Amino acid sequence: MVKSIRRDVFVAFLCLVVCLSAAEAAIKTYQFDIQESNVSRLCHAKPIVTVNGMFPGPTIYAREGDRVRINVTNHAQYNISIHWHGLKQYRNGWADGPAYITQCPIKTGNSYVYDFNVTGQRGTLWWHAHILWLRATVYGAIVIMPQQGTPFPFPQPDREEVIVLGEWWNADVEAVENQGNQLGLPPNMSDAHTINGKPGPLFPCSEKHTFAMEVEQGKLYMLRIINAALNDELFFGLSGHSMTVVEIDAVYTKPFSTNAILIAPGQTTTVLVRTNQIPGRYFMAARPFMDVPIPVDNKTATAIFQYKGIPDTILPTLPLLPAPNDTNFAMSYNAKLRSLNTPNFPANVPLNVDRHMFFTIGLGVNPCPTCLNGTKLVASLNNISFVMPETALLQAHYFDMNDVYTLDFPDKPPTPFNYTGAPLTANLRTVRGTRLSKIAFNSSVELVIQDTNLLSVESHPFHLHGYNFFVVGTGVGNFDPAKDPANYNLVDPPERNTVGVPTGGWAAIRFRADNPGVWFFHCHLELHTGWGLKTAFVVEDGPGSDHNILPPPADLPPC
Ligand code: C2O
């Protein structure tokens, strides 16, 4: 197992050395070859779509201020696009990546260069395919080092490691997705969770399929944890050691220590771990959080945290993770997340709101003549189930095409109701449409995302492209516009790009719309995104010459 220790530690270390000695801003270039590669997991070999034959794909290393150019060449049978999740892409939606939102996909045999600057961000982010379910195997980490001469606002770690959590199917994920669409029901759940692409020894064929990292006693390790799973919020822990959370979604937090973290699909969490325990072998483990009776792949992925010199024959122990339905842990954990908010890293929370939005999350059953049961599950925001266009929305906006989308996405649900009361099965007449919302440049926006009991309550991780936002409040039950804002945290709320809307509750986020473009907003559970739980914002150009969308690159894939 020690042999399977990945090169990332060394690469990261090398980068620390090379990057630190490099001149100011640099251009970092990468080649991504999208290809089908044979990968075996759970005693099961099959071709999966990968980047450069790697699973997970390569880590992108950059420094704040760098320009990054990634040439993506598609050799696979599927059309592809790659999203740099959490990168703000100021004025530069062309490099954002969601298929049919900011670009048309890169067709088989073609290439596209994602060219962007890393501005005002440092920490852990990630990249993934942003079309269909291909992100199940096409994903990797993005590590952004702070600017030259700027230390971390916490002790300098001796070593660092990327820990990407994922889900694995013993089948072609596109076939899995299609099977679900034909049934009009959720497709088969995953066969395993993974840590750095490997499920670990609680599964068959564990020898080859276990990620292990070797550590030395008395050192400080930084773990950059990413949830790349398609559909599962996860708890993650490391037996025998406590973790200190220092950063989420590439924003520093007030440090706090914990035995387990909760991480939703799309989110990242960077923790520090001191190797101050009796030298041994310790398990890292990840398994889902699900606090309603919805079936979920509840299997535990494990990996090994192995002190140097300890033989592989010592059996590791599992960390004590919260119970799968431990809502209290989830709430108290999320309540501990606070922006660092220092003069160097301020939390610039918008204090006044120009535009109030209130979006309800709805699940429903619609007729479906082509589905096996004659019906299918759909998901909606404010009763609108989003229909993907055939021309990318950003191009439609930039070139003033007027038949691709409408700008009438409502700021409120059509009819208020008791959102989280008794279970509702009433068909609220969910309509379908490519309906977007227009936002004035530089206006401050408050968006309350409200879960509902339409079919079932459930926790939903919502991701906004092109921005970070502040999570100024969350709560259980119905949002009360008269009372709840009084309890907002407007001082040091967590700043992130993906927020978990609590089961049967609400989350209030604020952001300043200073990045012109078309920005996707969606549930990061791929199942729900596919059912229509998404929309997009058109943020208008501002008055200044540097307040408009940059011209599209010449190699932008045509539709
Ligand atoms: Cu990480 Cu639109 O997604």
Image (cartoon, rainbow, N blue to C red):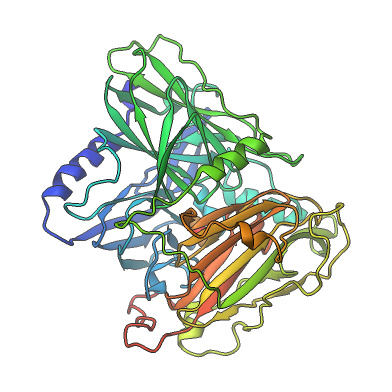
Q: Is residue 85 left or right of residue 184?
A: left
Q: Nearer the viewer, residue 469 or 100?
A: 469
Looking at the rendered structure, the number of numbered marks drawn on it comes to: 0
Q: Is residue 77 visible?
A: no
Q: Nearer the viewer, residue 472 or 501?
A: 472
Q: Position of residue 236 (x, y in %)?
A: 51, 33
Q: Position of residue 105 (x, y in %)?
A: 47, 68
Q: Is residue 97 left or right of residue 461?
A: left
Residue at image position (77%, 53%) is: 183
Q: In the figure, residue 147 lies in which quadrant? A: bottom left
Q: Position of residue 92 (x, y in %)?
A: 37, 74
Q: Is residue 284 visible?
A: yes
Vertical order, 250 against 207 (above or below)? below
Vertical order, 432 against 378 (above or below)? below
Residue at image position (51%, 42%) is: 336
Vertical order, 381 against 220 (above or below)? below
Q: Position of residue 397 (x, y in %)?
A: 50, 84
- Quadrant where the N terminus sits is top left
